[in-house]
Amino acid sequence: MRKKRILAAVLAGLLLTGCGPHRTDPADAEVWDVPPDAEKVIAYVPLDDRPDNEERVIYLAESLGYTLAMPERDLYHTALDGQPLNANGTQSGDRAALYEWVLEQEKAGCDRYILFMDQLLSGGLVNSRHMTEYQPVTLSDGRMLTERELLEELLLTLAADGNNRVWLLDSVMRLAPTVGYAGFGLEEYNALREYGMQARPELAESELGLERVLELYGKTAGGESFVSSDFALEAEQVVIYLNARTRKLELADYMLWLLEQLGNEFYPGLSRDNFRVLIGVDDSSEEDSIQKNEIAFLRMQLREGDALLSGVDDLAFKAVAKLYLEELGWDGANVCVRYFGGTEELPACAYDYKPLTEIVEEHFDFFGLRETTAAESDLMLLVLTQPADEAKKAAYYEQLIEELKDHQENTQRPVMLIDAGNARYGTAFHEALTEEVELGWLLSYAGALDMAIVTGTALSHGVARYARLSLDYQHKTQVSERAFLRTVADSVLKDFCYRHVVRAEITAYARDTLGGVADNFWNPEIDRTALLELLERRMTEQTAEVIRNLERSNFINELPEGKGEYSERGWGGIALENYRYPWDRAFEMSMDIQLGEWTEPHKKVLGVYYK
């Protein structure tokens, strides 16, 4: 606190002498945010309309010089129980309209695609967990297609153009469906998740066939049949659950089989080489669960260039980044990884299926990164884990901050930062970061929401930014740079201010004052206007210090050839507006980030940066 009072006094003196921080006006943002007529268009069918699948993907793509073409939101929106239905009369996305939208992009000459199979075949991630049988898709001309026929037509159409580059994204179904959707409740969720976590017989590679994997869904590790009543489940509930898993795995298997057939006697003259498959493991467990054989079965069928990794809500980030890296001719980078907290050999949370170190290693392989010493590295990855010793929490994050400051001020090595502490440090770590470092200098930051996706989120953004700075800096524009700044601001502000402070207040207000629940503002229906007013007021208060930090930060502007000293620019002003809850629940929120024009580098005076 003493340090803050001293800095406040210095700041007041500098303001009186006209030497305060230079803040460009974010009200002028529209002047700079009109993108040019872009040739690098990606046709994107999102997983759903949550922020990690919508605006944050837009920011990342634009920061790399792409423009995302997307369908109308209603076509991929997910509505929870009691909420207004989509235009197609359901809670899920419009599979027919989305399929026809993709065909329209192909006719218009698009040659880059990122397509979520959960959306195209099931109407979204949540609905993919609840569909227990195949349901034909009726197109606008009255033609009816089964899901397999739709998938086959889609792949054949896109394979006919050898210039197309197509990323097909899919997921390994999580251990239990979604609460508050299709009448599914919390007790049933807990029971089915416990059932799904139970070990099944582990199949050797020679035994990994679809029928064998499905056959063992209901078997214990010892080969006995599970008894549903042992998990407080009715037999019918288990049947419904396993039918949904079966449908999902069968469709993934058929997609991979189709890709193998492209170019052979069944489908001559078509190329499979321009397709990439990226599969994410949804909410999981370290146990030998029902997912284990599924994961091994799918991984066995992947081709060179395909991948199966932890995390689902970061899949679009990974696809955009890898598409960009491949188009650049990326040959990788040397990265030094430093963990602080002492629990890196454990999963980052109860919903991940491998230790954090293994998750990082798998993502390094995917992005072509080589782990090295700090002296040999091109960039750094700093990770705060859950604390091994509660009494040493402050020491863990203080060590990380000191190393981060050293890289900012001395070593000239860019940093990607991950908070994998899973809320165990409260707000102390974020407050110390805000006080002591330039948050806006980071290549990337991840900490908000599910721990299973923080690795993919930080590396997608950080590695892509590093490649942009070192190999593609001559193509940077006002639009792409401002999009990059939004990726940093969005992740930092939401994690520091919303996830760790404001969300709990929204949850309590919805419950204690409005008499509802934070998981769904429509069931029962409560005053959503009051919730938005509270959100805007508290975010305005909580973000003030972090915004001041960002506005006084410099960001790395160029890093020629990835070596040596880099050039910097200063952040401009920041304004947040249009707060909203895309799913009308407290778990995630969205906001528009307006930015002023960036400035000449800020200068450091007594630990505070000024122009």
Image (cartoon, rainbow, N blue to C red):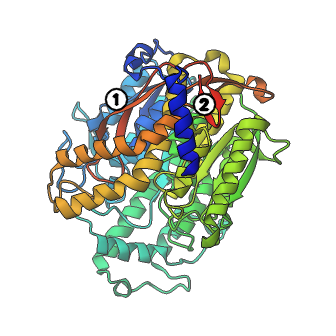
Q: Is residue 14 left or right of residue 144?
A: right
Q: Nearer the viewer, residue 230 or 332?
A: 332
Look at label 1 and name its amino acid.
Answer: Trp
Q: Which of 251 and 396 is in front in this view?
A: 396
How crowded is the residue under tag 1: few (<14 C-alpha within 10 Å), some, or many (20+)? some
Look at label 2 and name its amino acid.
Answer: Tyr
The residue at 36%/74% (across/down) is 190
Q: In this view, does 424 lie to the left or right of 92?
A: right
Is residue 262 shown to the viewer in this render?
A: no
Is residue 226 shown to the viewer in this render?
A: yes
Image quadrant holding the C terminus, namely: top right
The residue at 73%/40% (across/down) is 407
Q: Which of 243 and 419 is in front in this view?
A: 419
Q: Is mark 2 on a helix, strand or loop?
A: strand
Q: In which quarter of the image is residue 415?
A: top right
| Residue under label 1 | 101
Q: Is mark 1 on a helix, strand or loop?
A: helix
Measured in 3D between alpha carbons, the distance from the residue under mark 2 to the one under mark 1, in whole angstroms, is 48 Å
Location of residue 336 in the rendering, given as x and y in whole percent from the top left corner: 76, 47
| Residue under label 2 | 609
Labels 2 & 1 near each other (Cβ < 8 A): no
Question: Which mark lies nearer to you, 2 or 1?
Answer: 2
Location of residue 539 in the rendering, given as x and y in whole percent from the top left corner: 35, 44
How crowded is the residue under tag 2: few (<14 C-alpha within 10 Å), some, or many (20+)? many
The residue at 36%/49% (across/down) is 588
The residue at 48%/80% (across/down) is 219
Q: Quadrant of residue 115?
A: top left
